[in-house]
Image (cartoon, helix red, strand yellow):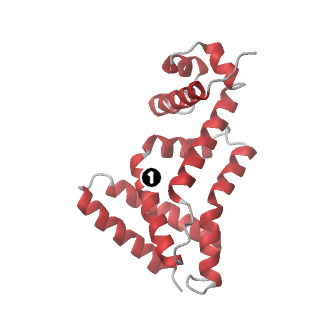
Amino acid sequence: MRQKDEAKAHDILRAALDEIQSVGLAGLSIEAVARRAGVATGTVYIYFKGKEALLEALYRQVKLAFSDFVLRDDGLPLKATFFRMSKSYMDYVIQNNAEIVFVRQLANSPYMTDASREVSALGARPVTALLERGKAEQLLKDLDTTWMMTFLSETLKAMAALAANMPMDQRLAFQDTVATLCWDALKA
């Protein structure tokens, strides 16, 4: 049996993401991914059993990269970590539009599996822990954590879209303001 090449698997996943950005999730085909990756269609099937497995692997890769970039708890005080996570979230959305579009499309499709939901929950644990810690320390309002996470996620995504077209100096000031607004909305 041939040894799987991690670089080739990465290339296939990147090609799938690019293809989804081009034709959407519904239009994705293994053949188009193979063409875009510069491999034979059969090669894709060596790495992924089918479209569903490919999408699940891509979702896992994207969500874990997002978590690594945004949601690490670096041991700073709660407010400093909250601000860093908020600004990192906006940076990620600005820099990774294809990934954000893919995650939204998959989350609202029949391709969203229980395994993908587990990856999503696992990736959200650091922010859940941060919000729970903030409530326990009475620094944040005692609201349902899911509500707080939804508020933050949707607010930061929308504001990142506004920030994307700003000059860098304005963007940084804007991100500070948005993080402050989010903090002020949730602080006790």
Q: Position of residue 167 (x, y in %)?
A: 23, 55
Q: Position of residue 4 (x, y in %)?
A: 67, 23
Total numbered labels: 1
Specify whether residue 108 is in view. no
The residue wearing badge 1 is 92
Q: Position of residue 38 (x, y in %)?
A: 51, 16
Q: Quarter of the image containing the C terminus?
A: bottom right
Give residue 45's quadrant in the image. Answer: top right
Q: Is residue 1 above or below residue 155?
A: above
Camera-side residue: 155 or 77? 77
Specify whether 38 is left or right of 95: right
**Residue drawn where x is 29% and y is 67% of the image:** 173
Specify whether residue 35 is in view. yes
Q: Position of residue 153 (x, y in %)?
A: 52, 61
Q: Is residue 17 above or below residue 89?
A: above
**Residue drawn where x is 63% and y is 20% of the image:** 44
Amino acid type of disc 1? Tyr
How packed mark 1 is, by other alpha carbons closer than 10 Å (few <14, some 14-19, many 20 or more), is some
Q: Is residue 66 above or below residue 15?
A: below
Q: Quarter of the image containing the N terminus?
A: top right
Q: Is residue 10 above or below residue 148?
A: above
